[in-house]
Structures are given as C-alpha cells and as structure tokens.
Image (cartoon, rainbow, N blue to C red):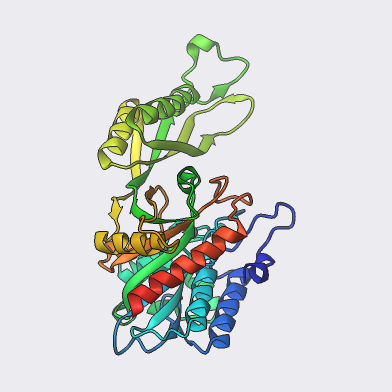
Amino acid sequence: MLEELARIGRDPATNGYVRDSWSPADLELREWFRGEATKRGLDLREDRNGNLWAWWGDPSRQPGVVTGSHLDSVRQGGAFDGPLGVVSAFAALDVLRGRGFSPRTPLGVACFTDEEGARFGVPCVGSRLMTGVLDPGKALSLTDDDGDTLSDVMARAGRDPYRIGRDEETLATVGTFVELHVEQGRGLVEQGSPVGVASAIWPHGRWRFDFRGQANHAGTTRLADRDDPMLPFARMVLAAREVAEREGVVATVGKVRITPNNANAVPGLVSAWLDARGATEAGVRALVTELARDADVVEESWTPVVDFDHSLRDRLALVVGGGGGGDTPAPVLPTGAGHDAGILATAGVPSAMLFVRNPTGVSHSPEEHAEQADCEAGVVALANVLEDLCR
Ligand SMILES: [Zn+2]
C-alpha cells in the first residue's frame, strides 16, 4: 500500500511530497482510500467536513473503535507522516480477518482532512471542525497562497462548504480512537523498541515578535546613527536557544520577514515567529516571558497539554509490550507534535497513539523513514490493540 501511495504528490526534483488538502493529489489519495475500503467490503462514508470513514460493522447502533490518521502532507514532507497510520489501519484489519476475528464493536478506519495545515496554515482542520473547536465561518474564509479560500476549493472539489462544522452524528460513532504514527524523534531508537505508546502531547504555541527600527542606506548611515532591528532579532534567536536549554524546552525561529528585505538597506522592521514547546506549560511560558522582555510580542496560537486517557494508554502499553510474549509494557513517551488524536482527546473521546520507530528521528522531510520490519511490528501491535478493544 505504501508503494502505491509513493507516486502520488511526489516532487521529482526533491523526492519530497506536496499533498495539500483538496489539491489533485489529495483527491487522488481520497480515491485510493475509497478503493481500499471497497476492496475490503467496508462501508465508506465522507462526513460533512471531508473526513473519510470506512466501517466494518454499523456504528449507528453502537459507537465504534476507530483507527487511522491522515493522507495530506506538509510541503516537501516524507512518505510516512500520516500515510503510515492509514495503511497500518487497513493492514491491521487484514490481520484480524486472517485470524478469523470478528469484532463485537464496530471497527472503523479514518482519514482526517488537512491535518498538516500546509495550504491554509491551520492544522487539524478536519478534526477541529468535527469537534467544533474551529469555527466554520472562520474556516471558510481561510485563504491559500493563490488567494483561494477553503470554501472555493471545497466547492471546486464538489463538496458543499456550507455544511462544515461540528458534527454530532459522526462524533457519536467514535467511541475510541487509536492513531498509529511514525515517531518524530528518536525516543524509540534510544529505548531499542520498534513500537511505543504516547503519553501526552506537549503544550505548544506560536508567537510573533516585531522588532522596529529605522530603514536606512547601508552605505551612508554611520553605525552610531543606526536603529537596526536585525540586532535585537539576532539576540532573541540566540537567547531562545540558551533559555530553552535552561528551561528544558524546545524553541525554534523558523520564519522571519524583513522589511524592506534589501541587501543594501538597514531594515525598518523584522518580524520573527517563535515556536516553543515543552513538557510543562510553566517551562514554555518562562521562556516566552524572558524573550518578550524587549520586544513587541503577539501570541498567535496556544495549545495546552493533551494528556491521553491513562487507562487506555496503560492498556495499550501492556497489549503492545506483551506482543513479544513477555509482560513488559511497551515504552510510553511524550511527543512535541500535534495530531488529530490530540484534538479528539481534548473533545472527550478516549484516544491513544502508537508510535513506530524512526531510525533518524527526522520528520516533515523526505528523509523521514521507518524500516519495513518496524512497520510490520506496528501493524501487528495495532491489530492486537484493536482485537483487545473490540472483543
Ligand atoms: Zn501526522
């Protein structure tokens, strides 16, 4: 299945993937999902927000156990972030059927729309709309780089954009959600285990720092006369690293906008975006407070910690760890990345995540990787978990 998907949305120049929501590549991925569901005799539904559901059993009578992930990608992303979870979901279902298992609880495979937010800048659009966290009016007016709104692109894809929003009917079908995902770090490499269970998603936020100065000629303005905002910006970047190390959090300045952005001019304005995440809100807040002391700062987003359902997490760790025949629970580890499972957990759906080892820890890049044997271990672990939850 991963091989079939490998050609869709690949940039031949870089081998990175570009799979924006509602793009031709995304529509092709949706067709692929439909085909896999049909092949297995599953009941395919697309909800009002564009999320796809393939059901084994009827969830209108009883909420089901759902597994899956997303098929869209960050721009120039890798082959595993998202697709591994969807592919493993179908493969786990095949394993269960091969065992002659038939679920007592309806079992669903989900593919959430626009998890990465590559096109419109807001991540987890499908799950946020479904759970009502994202206002539909606000979502419809989100605009991509070409000036098209979400409303435009959904209408062009033959969907009715005016039906998006909180979806009680679909939410009621999801009794439990388990998302398998390639690990975006080296935690499992360090623990020597192919599969682990998520404990929590770190609290994280994004802040815009504006440094103002005076734009001026690079040749004729004496150093003493300059008001150069690039200098406090540079100090902030260096301080972010230093304070992050001290607070035990991570901080990144990955985007900067310089005005006027001329090689021969002292800039008049430097805007920089700080992304900060950590195990505790206190650590992240301390970092931002310290960096914000001499700058004009706007908090653009804040997501509190997501602590996954403890009993579900512990149950998964035992099932996954016991898969090798022993009683040692699988490693339980936190992540700094957001996921649809986090959105559902916050909305009160008991949710959990399985991670599959990533040898380099690199993610959101064509170098993202998981070994075949580890992917297979992930499928078996997921099948065992589903069997346990659906019996
Ligand atoms: Zn993902």
Instruction: Give left or right: position of 241 versus 215.
Output: left
> Residue placed at 41% from the left, 86% from the top?
102
Where residue 294 sits in the image (x, y, percent)? 34, 25
Instruction: Give left or right: position of 108 versus 9.
Output: left
Instruction: Give left or right: position of 223 versus 169.
Output: right
Where residue 223 sits in the image (x, y, percent)? 53, 11
Which residue lies most toward the front here? 325
Where residue 308 sits in the image (x, y, percent)? 30, 58
* Quadrant in the rendering for residue 241: top left
Closer-to-camera residue (349/257) = 349
Of the 4 image quadrants, the one containing the C terminus is bottom left
Q: Is residue 264 above or below residue 130?
A: above
> Residue placed at 30% from the left, 54% from the top?
306
What count of labels does the image hold? 0
Of the 4 image quadrants, the one containing the N terminus is bottom right
Closer-to-camera residue (351/331) = 331
